[in-house]
Image (cartoon, rainbow, N blue to C red):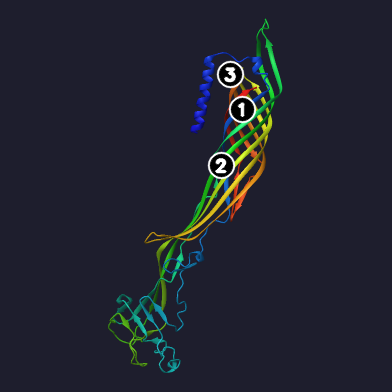
Amino acid sequence: MKLLRNLLATTLLLAVSTLARGGEPPASEARTNTWKVQVGWVHQWGRGMTMRGPAPTIGSSELSPLPGGYTVHDGAPTPTYPNNTLLVDRIFDDGYVRRDYWTGDDGLLETDNERYAMTWNWGVDDARQYQYAAGVPPTLSFHLSGNQAVMGPETLTGRGTDDDLPTDGVEVKFSRGLYTWTNRSATADDAAPGWTNGVTSLDLVLGIAWFPTVRQSMVRQARLGVYGVEETYTYLDYYGTSAGGLWPPLDVPYQGIFGDAYTAGPLIPERPESWDSTTVMLGTARERVTINTEIWRLRAAAGLTAGHELTRRLSTYLSPQVVLEFVDMRAERRELLTYTDALSGHVTTLHANGQSKHKMTLVPGFLLTAGADYLVSENWYLGASIGWEWLTYDPAIRVGQSHVRFNLDGGECSLYLGRHF
């Protein structure tokens, strides 16, 4: 916009200075010259870029293993020991529950049913794991963390369309007069011709416009939280029988005392009664897809210009033209998967790659412009125009999983300086 304001100011200054010098251009000469050449600045708007392809997404396999040894799972947390009915050894962060010699002895099902599936081979590290209420069999809670992590909901940001592809270029046009229609009336002495409707003309116009490289960048990002799973396994019936009586709390840390089937240390069920889980924030994963594009164009145009003089200095015109655009495109696609630790803020790159593609093509189209010229001297003129361009198709380029399409239909305006020959 600043450049546009400067050019308009320059145009006005030139016009004012010419008028200040006075003098009308010779009507007979200014209107009979058949060649025109003009050079100007062209600004285009309404162009855009669209990126299509799969949206970035983060899978559990891409994150495993996380720093710290976590394995990421899809969906909700699952127990490390999923079957509470099995008689198996279970190791926890703050203790253990293992089978003893008699735990799975089927003979106890007939002789001592309460001893079956019980064990003295267990240990506990922290008094807070042990819950005891007078007259109620105590419970023991064991905890397990650091084995698995789960992903929170995924958030997608960014857009796949950019309707602002700012373009400025330089255009050169050549015009050749084909026909003119003059409607004149003369004064009484026939010394100076008078103009009634001015001159209407039809010209052949050829043009070439260069639009330098325009760079665009488009980013889409998937983001989700990663949560560590803390499991809790609760064991009921501390001594293995509801008739065990009021037993004092254990002195912890505790490890099971060996004995025979009846003289070993306190017994607990070898199988947990329940399982529960909580989650804690570990960090944030981000999958970032960046598309960087470059495009430059060279446009050739040919058509007709129908003009009409409003005054000896000012004329207007309408110009339909066919165009052929040479389009040079380059696209680069970069993927970056990172993990940011919630505590330290340290960023770890888990995956990164990049691809690029180059393509050239020719695109035909149609351009319709309307404008006005102002004669500032005998042969020199200034002008401005506005128009709209349509192309037969949108040039596109594919890079990796992304398809980039350029919509080059849109409006344009120009300021130019020209000369009659």
Residue 107 image position (x, y, % from top left): 44, 94
Q: Is residue 391 above or below residue 404?
A: above
Which of marks 2 and 3 precedes in the sequence? 2
Image quadrant in which you'd find residue 235: bottom left
* Contact? badges 3 and 2 (CB < 8 Å): no
Amino acid beneath label 3:
Ser
Note whether residue 196 is visible.
Answer: no
Image quadrant in which you'd find residue 180: top right
- Other-residue count near label 2 (Cα within 10 Å), few / some / many at <14 / 14–19 / ≥20: some
- CA–CA distance between discs 2 and 1? 23 Å
Which of marks 1 and 2 precedes in the sequence? 1
Q: Secondary structure at mark 2?
A: strand
Which of marks 1 and 3 precedes in the sequence? 1
Image quadrant in which you'd find residue 134: bottom left
Q: Is residue 291 above or below residue 73?
A: above
Residue 258 image position (x, y, % from top left): 34, 89
User: To which residue does mark 2 refer?
Assistant: 213
Residue 241 image position (x, y, % from top left): 36, 87
Amino acid beneath label 2:
Thr
Marker count (numbered) = 3
Q: Residue at 58%, 41% (x, y): give it.
A: 47
Q: Secondary structure at mark 3?
A: loop
* Contact? badges 3 and 1 (CB < 8 Å): no
| Front residue (pair 112, 400) | 400
Q: Is residue 106 above or below residue 344?
A: below
User: To which residue does mark 3 refer?
Assistant: 377
Q: Which mark is residue 38?
A: 1
In the rendered image, the residue lying farthest to the right is 179
